[in-house]
Amino acid sequence: MAAWLTVAPGVHQRRYEPFDISIVVIEGDDGLLLVDTRAQPSEAVELAADIAAGFDRPVRWVVNTHAHFDHTFGNQVFGPGTATDAAIFGHSGVAAHFADFEGPRLAAWRADPTREPDRRWADVVLTPPTHPLDRALTLDLGGRLVELRPQAPAHTDTDLVLFLPDARVWILGDLIEESGPVMYGSGSYPLGWPGVLDALAAEMQARDLVVPGHGRVVDRAFVERQARELRLIAERFRAAHDAGLTVAEALAAHASWPIPVDGLVGAVERAYLALDAPRETLS
Ligand SMILES: [Zn+2]
């Protein structure tokens, strides 16, 4: 699994364990753009070595698809103060998401290393984007443009999609997943997520290439299918909330769900939180 797969000319995906995380390198005349940085500094050091062995240019730009640890905890290896000294781009909400979720998660792991003895959480320095974005931005890599598009709340409130107009490649982070069920991880927005995917799919052409946060490259039809599944889940959550069902009752009300029901407990809690919130904060 661990080798660079050329998705399109100058666009390369590599799938790393743990987590089958999608790392993408985009080549420009002026340097490389790296998408996501793996889950801890030692993994990012390995990634940097793989990039140095595979490409003849330095990483000048790093983009985080969202704040989750498996995509960002290697940032410190590429960012300010390092030999690479790349600019790190990400959604403007990443720093707040770190404070609310990834920071406490890191503290809990550090407090009890026996929970994940293989991991080296002590080495992690939370490194948010140097260039936080609250609106779309086009980067010029030299002979190639890459659009960075912060999204409305969906998988998280920090999702950012990359689009390469010349190659018709979309990089969606965990807005979609191929190698496992979609993850309602920390800070998800189950009700808003399907609409975000619908809007992206509406812009896609049938043969566009779509790189998920985890898994093999897919297409528009895959995105549409996952959007339908997420919409079904969101509609069931709304109906259960309207009917006054508890979280457990909401999940027990249907014999089957598009993803394993274990992965929906946190999701229905997040949906209920949104539905119980004052109207102006609904998303
Ligand atoms: Zn994620």
Image (spheres, helix red, strand yellow):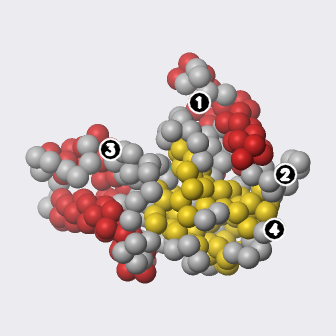
Q: Is residue 252 above or below residue 115?
A: below
Q: For mark 3, what is the residue?
A: 263
Q: Nearer the viewer, mark 1 or mark 4?
A: 4
Q: For mark 2, what is the residue?
A: 84
Q: Is residue 199 visible?
A: no
Q: Secondary structure at mark 2?
A: loop
Circles 1 and 4: CB distance less than 8 Å?
no
Circles 1 and 2: CB distance less than 8 Å?
no
Q: Which one is earlier in the sequence, the residue at label 1 or at label 3?
A: 1
Cα distance in 3D space between marks 3 and 4: 42 Å
Cα distance in 3D space between marks 1 and 2: 28 Å
Locate residue 273, reporting x and y percent: 37, 59
Q: Is mark 3 within 8 Å of ligand 1?
A: no
Cα distance in 3D space between marks 1 and 3: 21 Å
Q: For mark 4, what is the residue?
A: 30
Going 59% across and 30% down the picture, which residue do you hit? 109
Q: Nearer the viewer, mark 1 or mark 3?
A: 3
Q: Secondary structure at mark 4?
A: loop
Q: Nearer the viewer, mark 2 or mark 3?
A: 2
Q: For mark 1, what is the residue?
A: 109
Q: Is mark 1 within 8 Å of ligand 1?
A: no
Going 88% across and 48% down the picture, which residue do you hit? 83
Of 279 and 158, the residue lying toward us: 158
Of 251 and 32, the residue lying toward us: 32
Locate residue 256, reporting x and y percent: 14, 48
